[in-house]
């Protein structure tokens, strides 16, 4: 297999494909709550509910997308179909109404279902199961995720807030098309591990004049109206999510029992780590919702007197720190493994939770550092994102690598889809937790009336600080418990590190 910088050449193609897909996704996400509250005039509570339902469905979709790739499409075709649907979704949002927004979001959800789990699975398939470069490869891949996010906050969010949201959404769609072109051009480097399980059947007629491939594409588009309704009536998503999580948990345990004691234990630890993952990301994913409005209303965003960041651009610090430190962590894990000092996967989850909590506890200093307008200095939100980012590096790339190690060959994309289902649960929970910041809930206000129903700047600031302090204490407490329990939890992995 061709190598580049000590890794399969296919990793480079997947790196840039994922970078542009994340440019698309995070650009849209960075603008979403601001678009809902400032352009469509939704109240904060309703905006958080829509945001939570949308991001939950985005991460729920890979459960199905992974299974379809495993059994029908193969990973290469699934990724390309997903990219096309996501680009279409971004361009539909340009209709500039609530209806077109929901239809566009629905198309992005379907596209993400095909794209997200399967491109991560492809990264894992570039390496043999016992290849020590695997964790390093996933960390490099994760830098691509965050490079796309950084470019999204610097370009798409800035363009959307300064010149009009439609220009931001349009740029996001163009970014996704660039990712598709890169993937298509470099497919020879991973074609051998991404083919459909049964190519002949895929192109055979299965329903009237339609082949299996054509029927899958048609059904994918027909799912869009259903997702539109779920976004519109978003309280249903929570019920659907709980039922899905219970069903998937049952299936994993069932498969584990059938596969013997080792597979059973690995499925148990997988489920346990999924639950911790839900809590971590529910607190982390305030970035796109309550932390963005916190930056908008309670942070002095002036940068050394030179310029003022937009509220959405404060999300820039997370991908910036990932890129700054990601390669260091990639080397760190390899060096620690060589010295037999690399912490176990459960221990890394615990440390990540503690670091996340420290980030939120930084907001407590805002009680003593705010100015006369009750705006806290920019370093408060920089500190939040710094510790959240370090915590993320202990969990997210390691979690992706863990899934590819735990999964039997026949369940690789399915298990990756289940991992993203935990992100789905966390994003829905994040939307509910955001409401605790005490934001305005009126969904029919006009701009002239908005100031009358929003809390005062002082009240708003201290509410944010109190809620984020509680988040921090919970996260640190859970993290300490996980670190203490990590030796027992690690036994369930049966040698996987």
Image (cartoon, rainbow, N blue to C red):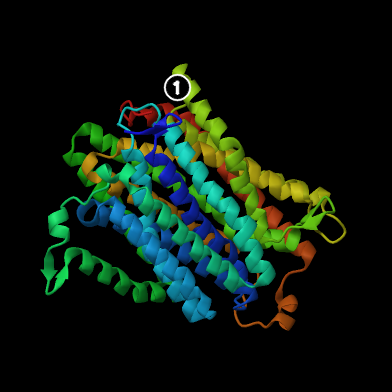
Work out whether residue 432 can be spotted.
Answer: no
Work out whether residue 412 can be spotted.
Answer: yes
Q: Residue furthest right?
A: 372
In the picture shown, does residue 494 fall above or below 185? above
Q: 298 and 163: which one is in front? A: 163
Residue 311 placed where, x, y %? 69, 61
Residue 398 placed where, x, y %? 44, 37
Q: 264 and 68: which one is in front? A: 68
Examine the image and state in which quarter residue 190 appears.
top left
In the picture shown, does residue 113 fall above or below 107? above
Q: 256 and 25: which one is in front? A: 25
In the picture shown, does residue 4 fall above or below 440? above
Residue 413 placed where, x, y %? 29, 48
Residue with the mark numbered 1: 337
Q: Residue at x 18, y 34 (%)?
A: 260
Examine the image and state in which quarter residue 177 appears.
bottom left
Q: Residue at x 47, y 78 (%)?
A: 100
The local crowd at label 1, few if under 14, some if 14 to 19, many if 20 or more residues have their Cα within 10 Å, is some
């Amino acid at each position: 297999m061709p190598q580049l910088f000590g890794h399969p050449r296919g990793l480079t193609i997947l790196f840039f494909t994922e970078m542009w897909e994340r440019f698309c996704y995070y650009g849209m996400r960075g603008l979403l709550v601001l678009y809902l509250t400032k352009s469509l005039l939704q109240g904060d509570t309703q905006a958080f509910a829509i945001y939570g339902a949308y991001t939950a469905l985005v991460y729920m979709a890979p459960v199905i997308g992974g299974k379809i790739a495993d059994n029908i499409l193969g990973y290469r075709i699934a990724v390309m179909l997903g990219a096309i649907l996501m680009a279409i979704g971004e361009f539909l949002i340009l209709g500039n109404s609530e209806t077109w927004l929901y239809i566009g979001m629905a198309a992005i959800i379907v596209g993400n279902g095909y794209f997200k789990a399967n491109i991560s699975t492809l990264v894992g398939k570039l390496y043999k199961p016992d290849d020590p470069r695997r964790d390093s490869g996933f960390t490099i891949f994760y830098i691509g995720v965050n490079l796309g996010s950084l470019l999204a906050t610097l370009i798409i969010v800035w363009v959307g807030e300064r010149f009009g949201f439609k220009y931001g959404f349009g740029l996001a769609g163009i970014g996704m098309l660039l990712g598709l072109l890169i993937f298509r051009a470099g497919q020879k480097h991973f074609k051998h591990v991404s083919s459909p399980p049964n190519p002949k059947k895929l192109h055979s007629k299965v329903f009237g004049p339609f082949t299996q491939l054509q029927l899958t594409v048609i059904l994918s588009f027909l799912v869009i109206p259903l997702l539109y309704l779920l976004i519109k009536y978003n309280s249903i998503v929570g019920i659907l999510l709980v039922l899905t999580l219970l069903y998937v948990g049952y299936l994993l345990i069932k498969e584990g029992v059938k596969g013997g004691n080792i597979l059973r234990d690995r499925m148990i630890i997988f489920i346990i780590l999924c639950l911790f993952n839900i809590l971590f990301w529910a607190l982390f994913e305030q970035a796109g919702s309550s932390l963005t409005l916190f930056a908008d209303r309670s942070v002095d965003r002036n940068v050394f007197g030179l310029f003022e960041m937009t509220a959405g651009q404060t999300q820039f610090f997370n991908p910036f720190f990932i890129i700054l430190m990601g390669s260091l962590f990639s080397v760190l894990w390899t060096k620690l493994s060589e010295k037999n000092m690399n912490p176990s996967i459960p221990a890394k989850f615990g440390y990540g939770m503690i670091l996340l909590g420290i980030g939120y506890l930084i907001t407590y200093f805002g009680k003593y550092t705010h100015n006369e307008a009750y705006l806290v200095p920019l370093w408060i939100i920089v500190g939040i994102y710094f510790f959240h980012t370090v915590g993320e590096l202990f969990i997210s790339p390691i979690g992706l690598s863990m899934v590819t190690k735990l999964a039997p060959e026949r369940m690789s994309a399915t298990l990756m889809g289940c991992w993203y289902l935990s992100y789905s649960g966390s994003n829905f929970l994040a939307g509910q937790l955001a409401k605790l910041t005490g934001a305005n809930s009126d969904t029919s206000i006009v701009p002239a009336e908005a100031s009358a129903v929003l809390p005062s700047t002082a009240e708003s600031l201290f509410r944010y600080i109190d809620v984020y302090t509680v988040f921090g204490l919970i996260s640190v407490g859970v993290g300490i418990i996980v670190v203490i329990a990590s030796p027992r939890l690690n036994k369930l992995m049966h040698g996987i590190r």
